[in-house]
Image: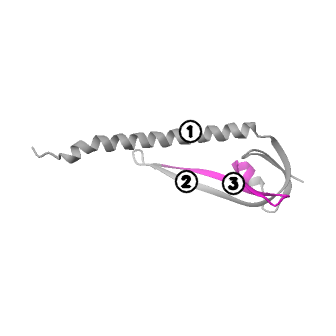
């Protein structure tokens, strides 16, 4: 029988390295998410005068080749400018996204990087 020699001896090493790499990326992503959540929870809730500068949405499509089903996810973002001139982009819900209008002035309430609300005023 024809043997692959080198490939047979290297494949387990490559497979192990790839598995460990993917697992490590998963752990790093989870730790970052938990860290961001913890930091937001420990940040003060602030309400500041702000202006809605821009809005955008990001749509990602997912296709499952086994079931031939397609789905999509939409993420909504709004950029606010505060009185100091600083800008921050925050993730907002779809209903908040529809409520916000570029150029609106009001009170932005946030905690860390977490959007809590915007009241026109």
Secondary structure under tag 1 reads helix
* Sequence-first tag of 2 and 3: 2
The span from disc 1 to disc 2 (Cα, nearest Å) is: 21 Å
From the image, give the main secondary structure of the stretch colored magenta: strand
The mark found on residue 61 in the picture is: none
Give the residue drawn at x 68%, y 36%. Answer: 38
Q: Nearer the viewer, mark 3 or mark 1?
A: 1
Question: Is residue 61 one of those drawn in magenta?
Answer: no
The mark found on residue 30 in the picture is: 1
* Sequence-first tag of 1 and 2: 1
Question: Is residue 75 one of those drawn in magenta?
Answer: yes
Q: Quadrant of residue 32?
A: top right
Q: Position of residue 67 (x, y in %)?
A: 42, 44
Dot 2 alpha-carbon crowd within 10 angstroms: few under 14, some 14 to 19, many 20 or more: few
Q: Position of residue 62 (x, y in %)?
A: 49, 50
Q: Does 57 sit left or right of 119 as displayed?
A: left
Q: Does 68 sit left or right of 73 as displayed?
A: left
Marks 3/1 in contact by CB < 8 Å: the verdict is no
Q: Residue tagged by mark 3?
A: 77
* Sequence-first tag of 3 and 1: 1
Q: Position of residue 4 (x, y in %)?
A: 17, 47
Q: Position of residue 3 (x, y in %)?
A: 14, 45
Give the residue drawn at x 21%, y 47%. Answer: 6
Which of 78/25 is in front?
25
Q: Quadrant of residue 15?
A: top left
Q: Which residues are magenta?
A: 70-97
Q: Residue tagged by mark 2?
A: 60
Secondary structure under tag 2 reads strand
The span from disc 3 to disc 1 (Cα, nearest Å) is: 22 Å
């Amino acid at each position: 029988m024809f043997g692959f020699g080198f490939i047979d001896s290297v494949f387990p090493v490559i497979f192990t390295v790839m598995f460990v790499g993917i697992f490590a990326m998963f752990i790093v992503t989870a730790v970052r998410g938990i860290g961001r959540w913890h930091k937001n929870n420990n940040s003060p809730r602030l309400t500041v005068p702000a202006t809605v500068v821009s809005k955008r949405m990001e749509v990602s499509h997912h296709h499952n080749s086994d079931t031939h089903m397609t789905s999509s996810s939409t993420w909504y973002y709004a950029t606010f400018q505060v009185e100091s001139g600083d800008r921050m982009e925050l993730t907002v819900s779809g209903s908040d996204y529809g409520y916000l209008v570029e150029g609106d002035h009001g009170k932005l309430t946030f905690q860390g990087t977490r959007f809590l609300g915007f009241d026109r005023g």
